[in-house]
Image (tube, rainbow, N blue to C red):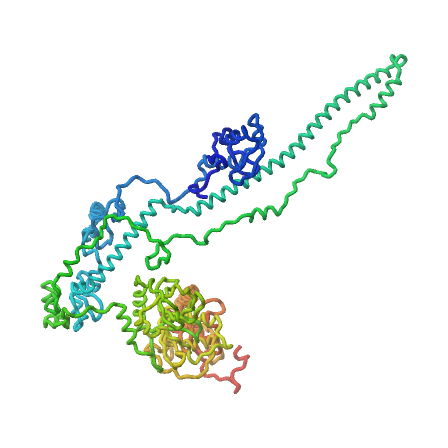
Amino acid sequence: MDHKFRREPSCVLCSLQFSFKDPTNPIGGKCPLLLKCGHSVCEGCMRSVTRGSTSVTCTICSQVSEANKFRNQEELREEFPLNVYSVGQVALKRSGKHKPKDQLIGFYSQKKQMNSETVLCGECGERAADCSCLQCDVHFCTRCFTRIHDSSVILRKHEKVDIKGNYKLNKDAFCKEHKDRCLQIYCNDCELYCCKDCVFSAHLGHSCVEVEQKNVEVLEKFSEAYDEANAVLKQLYHTRKKLQSNGLQVQDEDAANLERQVAIHYNRLHGLLQLQEEELLKKIRNCKDEAQKSLGSVLTNLEENIKEMETILTVGKASLEPSNFSSLPLSPLLDKLTNVTEMPCYLLLNNDQSINNFGFHEDSSIIDLLKGHCTISVPDKRTYELCSKLNLPEDYQFESIPHFPDPFKKPDLSVLTSRKKLGKITTNQLSEPKLLKTEAKNKPMSYQETLRKNRLTLQNNNSEETMSTSSADSAFEKICVAPALEEGTTEIVRICHLISPNNFYVQRKCTYSQLEKLRDHFSKQMNIKKNQPASVEKYEIYLVQFKVDKKWYRAQVKEVMEDKCEIFYVDYGNTETVDIKKLRDIPERYKTIPDQAIHCSLANCVPVGGMWNEEAVKIFTSMSNNVELSMFVVNINRTSKLHEVHLRRVQDLNCSFADSLIFLGCAGQTDVVNLQGLFKDPSSKKGFFKDIDIQKGDTFDGQVTHISTPTNFYLQRIADGGKLLLQQMTDLTLVYSHMGPQENVIYNPTPGMMVAAKFSDGSWYRGVILSIPRSCHIEVQYVDFGNVETVNWKDVRLLLPKFQKMSAQGLKCSLSDIAPKHEKGWTASAKK
């Protein structure tokens, strides 16, 4: 428990903490004593109360404990024993060993006080940074910059710039193609900035303006965004200051109060247990004391009886002496001896007949009762995080930020807006790149230089031309003008939501970036949270914040259920149930955008058994995950807008999704469709292993590796002892044994394909596909040995190019000048 919030043991009457000097012998007025209710009171308060009263009332539970006047400490502690649990707590606190070791707390030398807005040196971390290195991309103080960069010839060439007001710190101000040139031109057609060299090489004939004019156009929006960013920075400063003022641990009164309640309860519980323990031990001590007392009485009687018996026997012994026998009468002694024979001489334990033996009788149910006798309620998740203003809950209470100097206050913008507007740009206004004289003399004139020399004029852009549309408007226009899908067309797509091979959604490549722009536009609009609809209508389009990435997307209401509704993300295909309060109105123009999630189904492909199983969905996912697909539209249902399509991966157009599912036994084919020509792939020719260069009449050593018949067998040529082949087989097995489950998988095997196949001995060998005998199985011939095996598809992978260079080492041979004796062919004995 955190020592900062834990309440130390204290008296229920005076509320002062218990204390004493020696925990091995706690004495004094602040020693904890136990009341009958289990709570603790200090010895000083107990003495004060008992002077004028015969009872003590607990201020926590109001239970009354009877108390008499006590003459000394022993009598007081006999009635109200010392609370050993509280004594242990106080002793542990004084030792300091119970304090948690916080790795976040330490002691450091005092540093110079810095403002919260000061940028520190990235090297020493102590002094304020006043310069920056463009090449290192680090802020330095002057001392550290000099010390580091003067130590190396290379580092001396780095450029040092002032950290305040230097445009060179903005790396976005430089051309990505020509690293040392500033961006001076903005192309309206391409919507990007470029340098003057880029204009001649890539933007001839485009609508271009100078950067200054473009800046004037976006100045108003930039100013608003700057103010918002500055406000966010102030809030960040305020949040940091609030955290630092409270230390690294944030005050949480609810948790602290709960800790106090738990501590008080268990302190009392320990007290009650101690009281019960004392009561039981007292009963045992009373029994022992009574036994000891009886033993003392028995010992006294025993001593008296022994003395009496010794006296009688001494006299009797003397009477039997011959000298006394005639003078001493024996009859009186006989009576005494007869009487003492009945004297008790055996020690007997007189037990209570109802209790035979000592015993400890435990109620085992009390253990389970104690374990669950009390519970606490704490949140499952109680963590702190930084949240943007857009994603704050509606009931968030904003705090006032104290005023402090603003180091990022904007300069006067009137100077910028009062500048004279620029006119059109021509190549006459663009300076040519500076070349060395030798380069200009010897280097042949390029096409771009010819254009510069001829001073071709760029497309005019007069000063009255309106500002270019925003990225959201541009995305809106490009999506709306995208041509609709038609039957017989091919489109590059990606899967955006998958339910089954006959029920999935795709997005077209031509709208990827536009959808992202719309998403970012919706998410940046601060007034979205205010546009809550007055009523929610079924099939209407709204904006909804997706709970995973906190971005806003278009969604259509499918069902309305009291305070919740089921929505369909029209641009992505997934559905979700959300609170109606999460819906926001969307501008009407964005409702007219066609749904970008295209509902699709694999054509000519039906599930085996009438329903897609989990394995089929898993295979479909692995084939389509994070890859672009070539989609051929076979049929469009105009009513349901379901597109029946054929899918192939762009990087492997030989791999048809439908054929793969059919081969793997997950699907069946409905119609036979000739797909030839639907997908053009210039690299679709199957590869073949090189032939071994052997001429007629050559002689070489070899070993037979596989025999079918005397006229059909395979052998390997032994040229280098087989070292190269052995090394390749070793490398092949090593590479393919460590491949991931989705690497080089063959979903659509075809005859003639070069593969690596796993043999029954666990090793991998080169092979070629001969046929597909049945689903999930491939007939493979191992090209270096000649044998043919039927292998499970999971044990066959595409052969890497580096293993295709060596020619097939299994040479197909036939014995010359012989033929089988029987017409039916070679007999078994001949083959053997």
The spot of residue 366 in percent (x, y) is 60, 46
Comparing 684 with 821, the one in front is 684
Question: Seen in the image, is 141 located left or right of residue 518?
Answer: left
Comparing 619 with 388, the one in front is 388
Is 65 located above or below residue 128 in the figure? above
The reply to whether residue 799 is visible in this rendering is no
Question: Seen in the image, is 420 located left or right of residue 531?
Answer: left
The reply to whether residue 136 is visible in this rendering is yes
Quadrant hosting residue 56: top right
The spot of residue 690 in percent (x, y) is 36, 75
The spot of residue 145 in percent (x, y) is 21, 48
Residue drawn at 54 percent across, 80 percent down? 828
Question: Seen in the image, is 462 located left or right of residue 485?
Answer: left
Q: Residue furthest bottom?
A: 823
Is 735 located above or below residue 346 in the figure? below
The spot of residue 165 in percent (x, y) is 18, 53
Quadrant hosting residue 3: top left
Is 408 located above or below residue 830 in the figure? above
Q: Residue furthest front?
A: 52
Is 775 located above or below residue 78 in the figure? below
Q: Total of numbered circles in the picture? A: 0
Comparing 33 with 458, the one in front is 33
